[in-house]
Image (cartoon, rainbow, N blue to C red):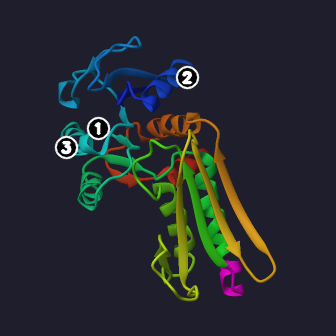
């Protein structure tokens, strides 16, 4: 049984994960943290992570980037494993994540879904074949109108997977509106669409001479991210320190 603290428990993802855990015999949420302290489930809810006085095996965080610094400090102090799912972190916060992982276990992935993380592996193989053959790479991501950051962390992670197969020699281009030139070879275009209630669509396009190869992933429910986060919490249980991502979870369960 993995005992979980849900950080951001009354948000959309917090509520979804709470529902998923209720149906999971191997996990239990023992406390929640949210600025809205309404108790919607049978666990206690605290306004701040520093107020939590419940024993647990891991924290799952789906909150707001403004809460991450305090969360990292608390997890380091308590040596509490952390599944960090909040996006839009600053460079300073990302550095703090790495520093925290030297003292406690931290799992952070741009996307928690199994499908996306498998796609990242496949992209490296495809890039090694298609890029030398002259295929250009473009990434288009689509999300709901409420998403704050753009491009998505997942789109950047997909771009990184492609670029790793290219010895990180390619430049990322996010806006061509001010450019009046032929598309350079060594670039990866990344475009963002925001609208409606799109959960998350990502297309990685390899455009060559007379043919196009597209890798697509569509999330029809936020449940795919919640299930991945729960798997990650189970994976982190008992780990003392280290920086992990969903690839470690996939390798451990395969």
* Mark sitting on residue 60: none
The residue under label 3 is 73
Instruction: Give me the C-alpha separation between circle 3 and circle 2.
Output: 29 Å
Question: Which residue appears at 23% of the width and 24% of the height?
Answer: 47
Magenta stretch secondary structure, dominant: helix
The residue under label 1 is 80
Taking depth in this image into account, of 243 and 154 the one nearest to the observer is 154
- Farthest residue, direction top: 42
Instruction: Give me the C-alpha separation between circle 3 and circle 1.
Output: 10 Å
- Farthest residue, direction right: 210
For residue 130: magenta?
yes
Judged left or right of residue 98, residue 209 is right
Q: Position of residue 17 (x, y in %)?
A: 48, 28
Badge 3 or badge 2: first in the primary sequence: 2
Name the element at disc 2.
loop
Residue 65 lies in quadrant: top left
The correct choice, above or below, for 154 with respect to 127 in the image is above
Q: Which residues are magenta?
A: 128-135
Judged left or right of residue 250, residue 152 is left
Badge 2 or badge 1: first in the primary sequence: 2
Residue 73 lies in quadrant: top left
Taking depth in this image into account, of 46 and 236 the one nearest to the observer is 46
* Mark sitting on residue 24: 2
Taking depth in this image into account, of 22 and 89 the one nearest to the observer is 89
Q: Are marks 3 and 2 in contact (CB under 8 Å)?
A: no
Q: Position of residue 22 (x, y in %)?
A: 51, 18
Question: Which residue appears at 53% of the width and 47% of the height?
Answer: 249
How packed mark 2 is, by other alpha carbons closer than 10 Å (few <14, some 14-19, many 20 or more), is few
């Amino acid at each position: 049984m993995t005992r979980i603290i849900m950080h951001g428990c009354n948000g959309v993802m917090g509520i979804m994960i709470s529902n998923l855990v209720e149906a999971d015999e191997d996990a239990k949420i023992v406390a929640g943290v949210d600025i809205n302290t309404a108790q919607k489930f049978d666990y206690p809810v605290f306004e701040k992570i520093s107020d939590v006085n419940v024993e647990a095996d891991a924290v799952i965080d789906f909150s707001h980037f403004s809460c991450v610094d305090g969360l990292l400090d608390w997890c380091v102090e308590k040596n509490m494993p952390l599944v960090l799912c909040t996006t839009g972190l600053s460079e300073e916060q990302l550095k703090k994540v790495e520093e925290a992982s030297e003292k406690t276990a931290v799992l952070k992935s741009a996307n928690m879904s199994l499908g996306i993380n498998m796609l990242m592996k496949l992209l490296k193989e495809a890039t090694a074949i298609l890029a030398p053959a002259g295929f250009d790479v473009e990434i288009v991501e689509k999300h709901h109108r409420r998403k704050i950051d753009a491009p998505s962390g997942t789109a950047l992670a997909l771009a990184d997977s492609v670029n790793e197969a290219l010895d990180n020699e390619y430049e990322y281009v996010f806006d061509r509106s001010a450019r009046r030139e032929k598309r350079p070879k060594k670039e990866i275009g990344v475009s963002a669409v925001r609208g409606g209630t799109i959960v998350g669509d990502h297309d990685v396009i390899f455009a060559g001479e007379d043919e196009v190869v597209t890798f697509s992933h569509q999330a029809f429910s936020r449940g795919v991210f919640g299930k991945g986060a729960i798997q990650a919490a189970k994976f982190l249980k008992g780990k003392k320190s280290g920086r992990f991502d969903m690839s470690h979870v996939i390798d451990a369960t395969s």
